[in-house]
Amino acid sequence: MNALLKHRLTWPVLALVLLLLLNQVFRADFLSVRLQDGHLYGSLIDILRNGAPTILIALGMTLVIASRGIDLSVGAVAAIAGAVSCTYIYTSPDPSSLQTAAVAVALAVVAGLVLGLWNGFLVSVVGIQPIIATLVLMTAGRGLAQLVTDGQIISVSNDSYQSIGAGFVLGLPISILIAAAAFLAAGLLTRRTALGTLIEAVGINPVASRLAGLNARTITMAVYVFSGLCAAVAGLMISSNVTAADANNAGLYIEMDAILAVVIGGTSLAGGRYSLVGTLIGALIIQTLTTTVYTLGIPPEVTLVFKALVVIIVCLLQSSRARTLLKQRRRPVTATSDVKVAI
Amino acid sequence: MNEIVPVVDLRGISIEFPGVKALDGVDLRLFQGEVHALMGENGAGKSTLIKALTGVYAIDSGTITVLGEQHRFAGPAEAQDARISTVYQEVNLCPNLSIEENILLGREPHRRGGIHWKEVRRRARAVLEQLNLGHLDPGSVLSSHSIAIQQLVAIARSVQVDAKVLILDEPTSSLDTEEVQQLFAVIRSLRDNGVAILFVSHFLEQVYEISDRMTVLRNGRLVGEFMTRELPRMSLISKMMGKELDALTELDRSDVRARPDRTDAVPLLLAEKLGRKGSVGNVDIALYEGQILGLAGLLGSGRTETARLLFGADRADQGQLTIRGTAQTLRSPRSAIDHGIAFSSENRKEEGLIGDLSVRDNLVLAMQASQGWLRRIPAPQQDQLTEKFIAALDIRPANKDALIRNLSGGNQQKVLLARWLITNPKLLILDEPTRGIDIGAKTQIQKLISTLAADGMSIIFISAELEEVLRLSDHIAVLKDRRMVADLPNDGVTMEDVMTIIAGSAA
């Protein structure tokens, strides 16, 4: 029991379960999932589907943060990816074919990789602080997206493209499947290889890592490229969902949600040990919160405040110092259970 | 010197940091018209004492008397008001401003609501001429001048405020010989004008050239105050290191191992006049398979810098490095490791440990880095390697999943050693592997080094403890003032021999 309480995922999971139960209290059919026309429907599915872009971006963000960095440009990269693909479809001679959609997706993915490479270059080769380096693209990226779309909102009608955000396979929304695949791929890529440990090593102690022979530059580059890729795919989902590219509003503030998801998931902003599962739970908490706001009928004016409150509570629950303080108030005399190995 | 009243009189200064007594009852007296050298190894408390005098640190006990007045400095500004000026190793002026602006920054003469630039120029020129620097253009931008000139400008600034005490903290560390002479000329003219100068430097020769009096510190305590001309270099060194010479020479030398050079073979590593500007120079090393080379010298003499050059952690810009008969340039630790070189830093915490990772992750890190990220060392093999070295090196606790930051210093050191041993290096560079660890672990590590060399590994061994170096090494390279000055085969070399070289007045 004690070990369970100390596990770093216990509190986020508990928060998520509590949020879901709260919804169930107010809406009896909240947790039910039903099959209709061979497709799964229900609030839980909605949470997963609407949360897919945040989950994707938060995955990339987790690795960036583990390496002691941060990527503020993900929202802008998502907007660029949507702009590139929609503009391509819009201007192509055959705007509704599968082939056009495939090329559009490929172009967007390449754009994401290139932008990630740019961020990685600024951070690891030029040596600019990550928050500044990615701030460049965060602001300039929206402008780039507008250049691509010529300042217009580009609407497209291509069934294949639309299915990325709204389609179903085997009864499940495609966006959920993409996010799940990305989650598994990231997990396998970092935990089945040594990449995860090496990223953590660079995040914990860059100097010692270099002296141990790690190629920190390549590793840093890799995490930003991965983050760019995730952002691009998320951008495709967002634009496909509304069948349009909106350079100004697509993925707006999504970097904040992603960073929050990572932090709620227990990965420290100081870098080092990370948890992809934690990030997944963190992203789900954020999405569930948005849903809860609607379920409870909370007026839109207080939505953001409500969200902030829940996030603060989760973060406080996670902080061991805050928990100790709470305990001390209840029981003035407590033995610390922190076991140090002394020799 | 007659017993006049000192300009600065520090008595019984103590400063405590959490868990450490940085200074313990230290006295320091600075006299008018004298250059006073503050001596001690790294960590002896020199910088702390300077910071106490300049108001950066508050003192816990003791008194500070300047010009007969007792002070309690609450900050650097108050020390400046007491006419104490400091010139630090890194010039802290505004590089984008002109020389004259820097000299008079914050004290510009005004006229009709604006700065009186003509007067600024006049005063700056006067100060520069006073220091024999009349050839400098006061209107030129500071950054267009060399570090040496910038330092002289910093001194000029302190002269302009009519400082009675001038503190020079390692002013010569990035200057070449000619620039040092230029600086010394300025110091002498200030001294003759009655300024009390406190000079801190690692360079023994410079200290003997410029100083009249010296105060020696060791481990935060005062060793004593001496007149420079009455204190031979040998006694100074033994005072700094805390060993009486007689005791040193009487050490048991029965277990000295001396292995002959294998001059017939190709040396594993051959450094010829290897160096890096501002770091270390003149490194000549020929190291053969299975040999142990000890690097001796005072702290700050360039031992660590030499190790970093040989490991590619810093890039050499002078001389040549040959590994197994082929000339090589080491661009990074990675390339050194690929040549079979390993380096365990003296700075365990900052340059060795990945604190939040487990013993196992730390132990296999270098091997994993060599294999590349794709080929992860399989978990069973990681466990087996870790268990093997936990047993072989007696690492405690014998728990491969423990976070390394929770281990004691000696056990952390063993894990870091194991990190390199599993990569099977040809050359292992150990910088202070036995520092700060208990005597049991120390003996274990010394024994291990001997065994490794007997098995054919070459080792470069750095330690502040000369006995240790002499006991383990086949060869001893002596460093002094950031240059390698001797390479002795260890056939009956005594501590006295090495210390004579370090003192080396003939240099």
Image: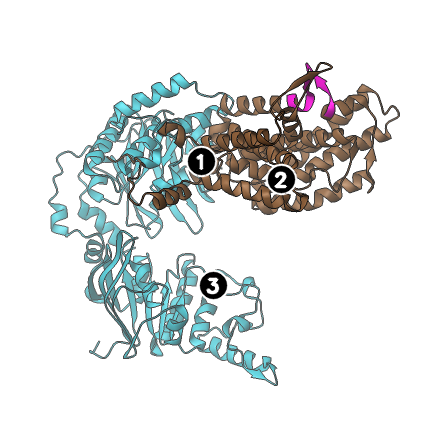
Chain colours: A brown, B cyan
| Image coordinates for residue B280, horizontal then vertical, percent | 39, 48
According to the picture, the residue beneath numbered tag 3 turns out to be B92
Asked if A59 appears above or below B462 in the picture, the reply is: above
Residue B21 - label = none
Using the image as rendered, state which of residue B351 and residue A70 is in the foreground. Answer: A70
Q: Are discs 3 and 2 both within one chain?
A: no
Mark 2 is surrounded, within 10 Å at the Cα level, by few (under 14), some (14 to 19) or many (20 or more) other residues, namely: many
Rendered position, A272 above or below B282: above
Q: Residue furthest right?
A: A93
Mark 1, chain letter? A
| Picture quadrant of residue B397 | top left
Element carrying mark 1: helix
Three-letter amino acid code of the residue under disc 1 = Ser
Residue B425: name its quadrant.
top left
Image quadrant where residue A130 sits: top right
Q: Residue at x 58, y 28 (%)?
A: A24
Amino acid type at mark 2: Glu
In the image: residue A253, left or right of residue B186 = right
Mark 3: secondary structure:
loop
Magenta stretch: give its range.
A166-177
Residue sitting at x 52%, y 22% = B374
Q: Is residue B316 left or right of residue B477?
A: right
- Bin the neighbour count of mark 3 within 10 Å (Cα to Cα): few under 14, some 14-19, many 20 and up: few
* Residue A292 locus on image (x, y percent): 61, 35
